[in-house]
Image: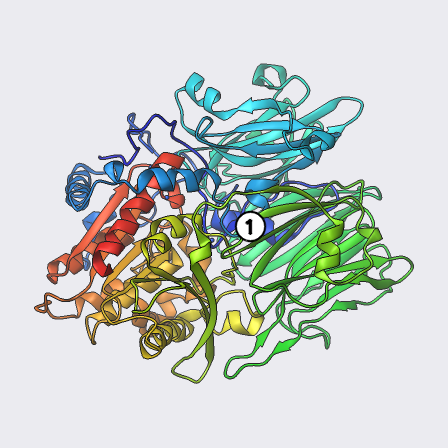
Amino acid sequence: MASLAPRLPIAAGSEPARRHQAALRRPQRAAAERKGRSALWSIAFGLGPHLRRDHRRRAPRAGVSVATEEKASDPDDPLSWLEELDSPAVRSWVDAQNQATLRLGDPRHSPLLPRLLATETTDIDADPLRKLAQVTEIGGHFYDFWSDSLKPQGVWRRTSLESFLSEEPSWEVVLDVDALGRAEGERFVWRGFDVLVEEEHGSRAMVFLSRGGRDAFEAREFDLDRKTFVPEAEGGFRLPESKTVVSYRSRDLLLVSTDFGPGSLTYAGYPRSVRLWRRGTELQEAPVLFEGNVKDHVVLGYVVRNDHFQVEVVQRALSFHATEWLLALGEEELRRLDVPQDAELTIFQHFLLLQLRGGFEGFPPGALLAKSFTNSTEGWEQLWAPQRLPCSGTPRWSTLQKVVCTRNFVVLQILEDLRGQLVVLKEDGGWSRHWSSSGFDESLVSLSVRAVSSSSDGLWLGRAGYRRPPALFYAEDIGKWKDPSWSALLAGLRLVRQLQELYDSSKVQEMRLEATSADGTEIPFVCLRPIDAHTAPPTLVYAYGGFGIPLLPSYHASVGAAWLERGGQYVEVNLRGGGEFGPAWERAGRLAPGRLKAYEDLEAVADALVAQKLAAPGRLALLGRSNGGLMVANEVVRELARPVRFAALVAEVPLTDMRRYHTWLAGHSWLEEYGDPDVDWDQLRQISAYHLAQELPPVEDGSRPRVLFTTSTWDDRVHPCHARKMVKVLQDLGLDAFLYESKEGGHGGAASIGERAALRSLEYEFLWKGVG
């Protein structure tokens, strides 16, 4: 099978970055901060918003089973043979599809590729902190994981705070993932770590490494002082490849959620129990701390430590949006918390901080509450509540994105009409607002904050915008913040890093617009457009609209290099179902009726662009990924039944078969988001693009859109058969439909910087040729 690895003097390999999920990466176990839902989302979207050359044809291991090994094929589906993961017939068909796609233009020889390689090396997507400062304080050192063209799989490294704040930090390499892969004949992708710091015995970490970018990874114990793995012969912990959550309870005892053998996983393929694994014993003998049901989404456990005590937390996720919380303080038994199942939990000192999704005890949806868990007589206190934004149709609200805890303060990262704001709270015998930002910046800006360490009140603050490269600031002590204006705040912060401009944004204007959807709801969108555009330029539209994931102002360097510098314009749409405007906006896009509304939102934006002469029919392109790929697949079908809106479309790692999606891989965990086809098939059929396409007559109009589907053979989240079967049906209809299926990369689509850049080049060139 063809690989897109570029033939350039640059090493290949890096952790895949996802434009709409940066906030959903596997959390680092900070001592004073624990946002529980982020641990759950890391399971759902990849433990850790573009290829695995498994020459040995390794059979899937426990915990990474594939569809054909889980569920029998549908005898009524003539294309069920494409559900085989890697049979000779499937491999031959996929190879032929790949070759046909590459004949359109091999991205390895594209002049665009070097530009995209540069942006992939430095592109930070939605989180301004991800590339600039993913530093975590451990035992006085500041650790960071870094990948670039010289170290594409990356190095785990450390330095001092003073050195990091300097212009040229001096780094000490702790673990070289490239070297490890060469030594073991593997291609590892970094997935994070869990750490235990003990002054007496030194620091240990459980390091997580994925093969080829899969969601599943193996976990190995690492000695941070000796900078080496702890051999199993010396009692070192090691867990085989699975979708795992592991956390130190003590030096010789782990909380483990993993694949323990037959019957130990949920229907979604995730762990359903938490066990206590003691050093020197067999994993299978570990006693059960808590066990859930096979119908649950996942069960996981972890430990939160601060200056006051140690808390064990168990999350029993009944579904993607509903979780039971259990806590044990010190040596106490686990006890279930009486809190809403859709709420998120953070622990600060001896307080529970509860972020609501729905209403609770008279408190409004979206509010943040606090309660001492050492004083059972105290009730909940409201610390923050969202404010309604002016709009029509579905209500839009300010929303709490993130809760960050320093030693003495709680920092709220708030999204207010796509602009970042901050609030700093303090508890000193009672809760008070210590500081809050006032006013807005001159343009749409994303904020991202992270505590410097659990023992200080320092804060990292990242800022980025559509035309503003990410910048990293350092606040030594947020307790000293007084003036609420942004200008005064930034003047008092230390600028640590700022990425260089990777495309010429001086020729691009940023426009904030709205379109009216079919039911009267106003749908916001952002348009990046050439300042001197006098005609309707080629327009690329990107949207997602699901799972409460927001599309935030981001410095999309690859879009700038591949699209804007050519004279095109880029449009980003905030569909219902996303997390930009509070719980009501998110819920409005759920299930099949909500998805149909989101598709109407998208079409309203496309029509508004044409009506305002910002774009022209036949010059609109559409790109979507995962859930956004489902949107694209449905738009392809809808395009065939109406005058063309989108002339070229790309769907990355999409869902398309909504009749059987819940039987493959992680699909069962999305029932609450999409619906249960065994119960609601009449509704779900309305968004099952694969089935809708089978009802269409053959295409006779040669002006119908061209579409490209991309996927990965070893995607262990969304089965590649979704893309394969959809392409085959569309081709049988006479449509120009193409497939590129990489051999590795998991749900990220690629396992290296080079392959990801090449895949993006393939997609952008395909879209540009369709509308340019």
Could you tell me the amino acid type at mark 1?
Answer: Asp
User: Are there few (<14), some (14-19), or many (20+) residues within 10 Å of tag 1?
Assistant: many
Name the foreground residue: 447 vs 228. Answer: 447
In this view, the residue farthest toward the left is 700
Q: Position of residue 199 (x, y in %)?
A: 79, 25
> Residue at left 59%, top 46%?
129
> Residue at left 14%, top 42%?
96
Give the residue at mark 1: 127
Name the foreground residue: 687 vs 163. Answer: 163
In the figure, 20 relative to 210: above or below? below
Horizontal relation, residue 436 to residue 12: left or right: right
**Quadrant of the rendered image containing residue 489:** bottom right
Q: Quadrant of the N terminus?
A: top left
Horizontal relation, residue 326 to residue 764: left or right: right
Answer yes or no: is residue 389 visible.
yes
**Quadrant of the rendered image containing residue 540:** bottom left
Indicate how the structure is coloured in the image.
Answer: rainbow
**Element assignment for label 1:** loop
Q: Position of residue 500 (x, y in %)?
A: 52, 43
Answer yes or no: is residue 72 visible.
no
